[in-house]
Image (cartoon, rainbow, N blue to C red):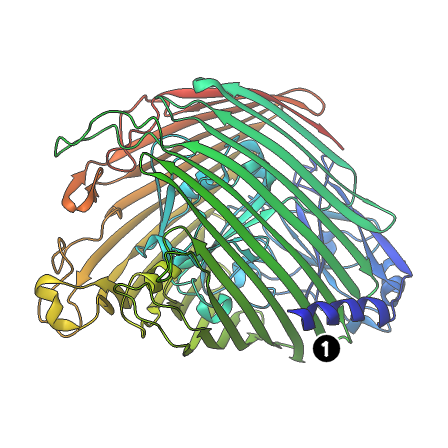
């Protein structure tokens, strides 16, 4: 880590910069000529993205290119309609004496077809209506690969949805992504788990701006309840095992929350709202560019009392990004901090065993977490890019219960050096080295003297990925990552855990993803990958097994995407299969014959199914999206047995908290001063643990449910919008997590003010 930081500073100080630049200005419109606000404009060269910005309320944007491309910028005004690009292809950049070094422009906007064109002065870019949401720099690859060209299952929640849906917590938007099941324990602030395509809740990797926010303690230390939407620009989601790209913990997918970024023009946004359960939310965001520096900052606070005693919740967060571009060099620093506190009233709903004794008025949880990063990029030539990055994450959690106070502290530092090379006109590769250190300190992790001590782990990896493009119709990504995980000696606890000597784990994880544009309206896609999750700090602390291995995942998916009705209708069907190996299980009773350890890597399970989605955009003012997921999960026999599973489960049983059927629907209406949404999602019945004492006290079926919401934005005057959001509009009584009633009919109303 010290080496990477030193290298970054050295590059900043000693690599020469070319500061002269030429400015590109333009405007993005729809077919009627109306401006498109919030469109993403990217400068893209052979090595990936150079620069990104978004359009203002009038559809305008401004970006700069260095002096090598000044001749192109000085040419006559250009219209996107003058640069016809067949679907799936990009424009040739051979327009001037030195065009190989000049980027092209890619424009994306939700509900519009992606447009690629050459740079020029005073661009007028007209986007065609299409039922798609695309982006250029998305998860799923170490290279910048547009979502529309990826073979993996990628979904994007764009900034327009984040802004207009008026959700206080960003994770609530994940309910409308196929293959994802969100499980929230009651009201806002309740523990929120995410299951991706049937994988365990700790099999999905959560990131903020590309920085993993997870803990070595008990798996992902952050649940999904504490990421305020006010700080988020957009969300990127990829489904399937991704350890070849992201390393440990990416067993079933990755969720990356991208926060507010600097913009080319001044942008100031404020929000104030109130509603049911004394909900109060305030937020302010500012972004802009001054003296060559891009700056964005955000702050917000959310308070709510909840429907019962000790169900209150408070969340405060701060965000800061600073960027600077020096010719071929790009530098970025940023940080995010969140403080939240929630009452824990316990399960006060379904009580199948008659164990409810009243609302828990004592238990409370408080979390403080933060992350920071620094990134440096330089295009050494038109064919080589070097990147250096470093980041840290720290989480401190305290829990007060009737049995006393306990704490958990997780921290993680990581650094990475990457080289991207353009091997040929249609072949790009990336390779690099990655290192991380993670550590946990917890009330219950003690030595033989009952003193707490930290458990640490070091991880070093090397990786490579190659992307090949054939005639703009076939795209292939293939990558490999080798991981070396070392855990230092762990002292004994004086009881069941002996002294564990230092241990080493070596694993290699591949990934292959392909996308084939069979015809201009038909695309096939598929991917294969492996994932791994090393044992958590708790799993190492509470066992007598010094040789616990990582839990593993093998994942495959394949699908077909079809455009109809002159590209106004988009259909997709994807089959997926996930096999989970070496799952850590507690042994005893009839299972004691399988291992002489308390815990071992003996459990297996699988999840398979299909995701169906449809999007239709008949006109600029109407956008309809829907999806349906069919999921089959099974517990398989433990290794070394014919028909044994951990008690109280049985072989062939469905995995808990994962419904067999689920679906989502969003209808968006935008016309004049009005922007409105009708949303809905449903879940079929699912198997749950007894809410008070867990699976050891029995398993029970929780009936399915449906939730409908109505959201309305009305622009009062320029820059000022009033909104109202009606949640659970049908006033349904249901429990997303068995025993924890979800809020009945409730609403919020507020004002948003935007200055550009």
Residue farthest along the bottom direction in this orientation: 423
Q: With 222 as the anchor, is 731 left or right in this view?
A: left
- The percent coordinates of residue 508 (x first, y second) are 43, 79
Q: With 746 as the anchor, is 295 left or right in this view?
A: right
Residue 61 visible within the image? yes
| Residue sitting at x 44%, y 18% | 276
Residue farthest along the front direction in this orientation: 449
- The percent coordinates of residue 621 (x first, y second) are 55, 32
Q: With 584 as the anchor, is 126 left or right in this view?
A: right
- The percent coordinates of residue 58 (x first, y second) are 74, 35
Quarter of the rendering occupied by the N terminus: bottom right
Q: Is residue 619 above or below residue 120?
A: above
Front one among 116 and 316: 316
Q: With 267 as the anchor, is 637 left or right in this view?
A: left
Q: Is residue 628 above or below residue 536?
A: above
Residue 36 visible within the image? no
Q: Which residue is mark 1?
A: 383
**Which corner quadrant of the image does residue 54 belong to?**
top right
Quarter of the rendering occupied by the C terminus: top right
| Residue sitting at x 20%, y 30% | 350
| Residue sitting at x 33%, y 63% | 493
**Which corner quadrant of the image does residue 489 belong to?**
bottom left
Front one among 200 and 682: 200
- The percent coordinates of residue 244 (x first, y second) are 47, 71
The crowd level at tag 1 (other Cα within 10 Å; few <14, some 14-19, many 20+) is: some
| Residue sitting at x 64%, y 35% | 299
Q: Is residue 50 above or below residue 739?
A: below
Front one among 361 and 223: 361
């Amino acid at each position: 880590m010290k080496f990477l930081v030193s290298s970054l500073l050295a590059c900043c100080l000693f690599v020469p910069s070319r500061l002269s630049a030429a400015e590109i200005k333009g405007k993005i419109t729809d077919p009627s000529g109306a401006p498109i606000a919030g469109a993403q404009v990217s400068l893209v060269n052979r090595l990936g993205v150079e620069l990104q910005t978004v359009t203002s309320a009038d559809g305008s944007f401004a970006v700069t290119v260095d002096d090598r491309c000044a001749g192109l910028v000085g040419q006559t005004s250009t219209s996107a309609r003058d640069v016809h690009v067949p679907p799936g292809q990009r424009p040739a950049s051979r327009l001037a004496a030195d065009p190989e070094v000049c980027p092209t422009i890619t424009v994306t906007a939700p509900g519009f077809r992606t447009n690629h064109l050459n740079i020029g002065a005073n661009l007028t870019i007209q986007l065609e209506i299409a039922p798609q949401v695309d982006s250029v720099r998305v998860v799923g690859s170490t290279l910048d690969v547009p979502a529309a060209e990826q073979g993996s299952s990628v979904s994007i929640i764009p900034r327009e949805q984040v802004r207009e849906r008026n959700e206080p917590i960003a994770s609530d938007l994940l309910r409308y992504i196929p293959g994802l099941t969100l499980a929230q324990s009651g009201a806002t602030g309740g523990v929120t788990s995410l299951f991706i395509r049937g994988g365990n809740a700790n099999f999905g990797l959560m990131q903020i701006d590309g920085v993993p926010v997870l803990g070595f303690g008990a798996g992902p230390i952050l649940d999904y309840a504490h990421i305020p939407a006010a700080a988020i620009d957009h969300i990127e989601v990829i489904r399937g095992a991704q350890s070849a790209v992201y390393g440990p913990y990416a067993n079933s997918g990755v969720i990356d929350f991208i926060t507010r970024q600097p913009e080319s023009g001044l942008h100031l946004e404020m929000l104030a709202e109130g509603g049911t359960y004394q909900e109060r939310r305030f937020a302010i965001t500012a972004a802009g560019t001054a003296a060559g520096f891009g700056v964005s900052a955000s702050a917000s606070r959310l308070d709510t009392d909840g429907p019962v005693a000790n169900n209150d919740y408070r969340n405060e967060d701060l965000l800061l990004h600073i960027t600077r571009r020096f010719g071929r060099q790009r530098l970025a620093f940023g940080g995010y901090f969140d403080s939240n506190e929630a009452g824990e009233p316990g399960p006060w709903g379904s009580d199948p065993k008659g164990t409810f004794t009243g609302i828990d008025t004592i238990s409370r949880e408080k979390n403080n977490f933060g992350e920071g990063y620094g990134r440096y990029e330089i295009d050494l030539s038109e064919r080589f890019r070097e990147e250096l990055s470093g980041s840290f994450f720290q989480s401190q959690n305290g829990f007060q219960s009737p049995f006393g106070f306990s704490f958990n502290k997780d921290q993680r530092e990581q650094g990475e050096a990457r080289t991207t090379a353009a091997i040929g006109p249609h072949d790009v590769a990336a390779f690099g080295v990655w290192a991380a250190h993670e550590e946990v300190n917890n009330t219950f992790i003690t030595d033989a003297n009952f003193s707490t001590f930290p458990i640490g782990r070091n991880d070093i990896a090397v990786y490579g990925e190659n992307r090949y493009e054939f005639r703009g119709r076939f795209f292939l990504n293939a990558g490999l990552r080798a991981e070396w995980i070392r855990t230092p000696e762990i002292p004994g606890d004086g009881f069941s855990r002996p002294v564990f000597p230092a241990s080493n784990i070596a694993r290699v994880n591949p990934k292959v993803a392909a996308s084939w544009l069979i015809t201009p309206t038909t695309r096939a896609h598929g991917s294969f990958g492996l994932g791994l999750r090393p044992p958590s700090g708790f799993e190492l602390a509470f066992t007598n097994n010094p040789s616990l291995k990582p839990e593993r995942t093998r994942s495959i998916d394949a699908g077909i995407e079809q455009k109809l009705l002159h590209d106004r209708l988009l259909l997709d069907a994807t089959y997926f299969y996930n096999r989970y190996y070496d799952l850590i299980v507690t042994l005893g009773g009839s299972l004691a014959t399988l291992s002489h350890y308390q815990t071992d890597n003996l459990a297996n399970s699988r999840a398979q199914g299909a995701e169906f989605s449809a999007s239709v955009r008949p006109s600029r003012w109407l956008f309809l999206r829907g999806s349906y997921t069919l999921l089959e999960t099974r517990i398989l026999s433990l290794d070394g047995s014919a028909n044994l599973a951990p008690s109280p489960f049985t072989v062939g049983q469905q995995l808990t908290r994962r419904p067999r059927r689920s679906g989502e629907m969003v209808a968006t209406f935008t016309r004049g001063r009005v922007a409105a949404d009708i949303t809905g999602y449903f879940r079929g019945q699912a198997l749950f643990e007894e809410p008070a004492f867990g699976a050891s006290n029995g398993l029970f079926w929780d009936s399915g449910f449906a939730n409908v919401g109505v959201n309305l934005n009305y622009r009062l005057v320029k820059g000022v919008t009033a909104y109202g959001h009606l949640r659970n509009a049908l006033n349904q009584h249901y429990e997303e997590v068995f025993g924890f009633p979800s809020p009945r009919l409730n609403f919020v109303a507020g004002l948003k003010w935007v200055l550009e």
